Image: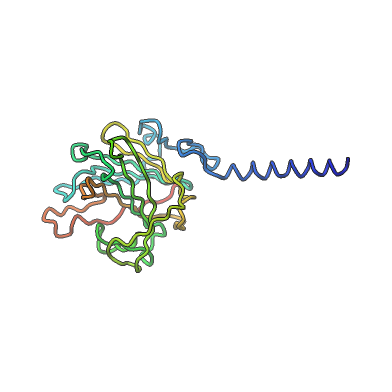
């Protein structure tokens, strides 16, 4: 009888341990209750009105300047708390008409907010262009024109502050890192789960930039400088986002 009692306690302890651990694991990307917290922004409701409820001083926003080199991306907004990074991109649908798997979105992140790591200098300002630690490459549609949102995580594998396309995919990063939706025909809204990204973020801030492509040609870039003659190839500093803790 005593042995059975001990066995029962062991079973209860095991169940409690598993239950506690499961609370700390993300579930389906469409489930907005992650890590025991309620996400402030929903990315499965076909709406962006929940952004209006946030403290607007905590949102980082950039808009397209006059006379840009690339004009398909009109506005980018980013909000980050201790668990997730949320972004909202407004684009010009008349410049994104092919709707194939060759239409992509890139998200470039300098997670540690340092230029002592990372690379890829081509798109952003000379001062901090070689500091991107990793990126997400997203196919917005499949070849049948249906919404795809196929995410690939890639980390910088070239020399520090190096040039070129020296990215290495990491297929071990679960798709649960991300969730995304189209809102209407001109807004992309998405979420990244910071906990699941295999790179240590700075405790306070990071920088982020976006480009959008049609048939793998750049048609949109944010942030972007006003360079009507193209002498800086549209380069600007990436968005500096401070965590709202």
Q: Nearer the viewer, residue 141 or 90?
A: 141
User: Which residue corresponds to the image point at 42% horizontal and 59% vertical from the top-left?
Assistant: 112
Left or right: where does residue 181 sit relative to residue 15?
A: left
Q: Quadrant where the N terminus lies?
A: top right
With 41 as the anchor, is 161 left or right in this view? left
Picture layout, residue 196 above or below residue 8: below
Q: Position of residue 33 (x, y in %)?
A: 51, 37
Q: Position of residue 178 (x, y in %)?
A: 42, 44
Q: What percent of the width, then of the height, locates residue 166?
A: 32, 62
Q: Nearer the viewer, residue 32 or 65?
A: 32
**Residue that sits furthest to the front in the current view:** 144
Residue pushed farthest right? 1
Residue nearer the viewer, 137 or 37 = 137
In this orientation, does residue 177 appear? yes
- Rendered image coloring scheme: rainbow
Residue most extreme to the bottom:
159
Give the mark count.
0
Give residue 18's position: percent from left, percent from top.
65, 44
Image: 159 above or below 98: below
- State the image quarter where residue 116 is shown: bottom left
| Residue farthest left in this picture | 229
Q: Is residue 133 visible?
A: no
């Amino acid at each position: 009888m005593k042995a059975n009692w001990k066995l029962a306690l062991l079973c209860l302890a095991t169940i409690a341990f598993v239950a506690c651990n499961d609370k700390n694991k993300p579930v389906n990307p469409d489930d907005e209750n992650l890590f025991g917290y309620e996400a402030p922004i929903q990315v499965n409701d076909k709406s962006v009105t929940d952004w209006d409820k946030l403290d607007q001083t905590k949102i980082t926003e950039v808009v397209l300047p006059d006379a840009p080199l690339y004009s398909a991306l009109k506005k980018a907004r980013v909000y980050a708390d201790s668990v997730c990074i949320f972004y909202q991109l407004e684009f010009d649908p008349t410049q994104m008409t092919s709707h194939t798997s060759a239409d992509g979105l890139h998200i470039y992140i300098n997670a540690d907010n340092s230029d002592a790591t990372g690379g890829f200098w081509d798109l952003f300002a000379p001062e901090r262009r070689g500091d991107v630690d990793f990126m997400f490459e997203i196919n917005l549609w499949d070849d049948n024109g249906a919404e795809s949102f196929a995410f690939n995580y890639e980390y910088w594998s070239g020399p520090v502050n190096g040039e070129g396309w020296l990215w290495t995919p990491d297929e071990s990063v679960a798709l649960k890192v991300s969730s995304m939706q189209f809102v209407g025909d001109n807004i992309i809204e998405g979420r990244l789960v910071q906990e699941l990204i295999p790179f240590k973020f700075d405790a306070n801030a990071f920088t982020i930039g976006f480009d959008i492509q049609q048939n793998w040609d750049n048609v949109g870039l944010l942030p972007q400088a006003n360079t009507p003659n193209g002498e800086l190839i549209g380069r600007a500093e990436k968005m500096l986002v401070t965590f709202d803790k």
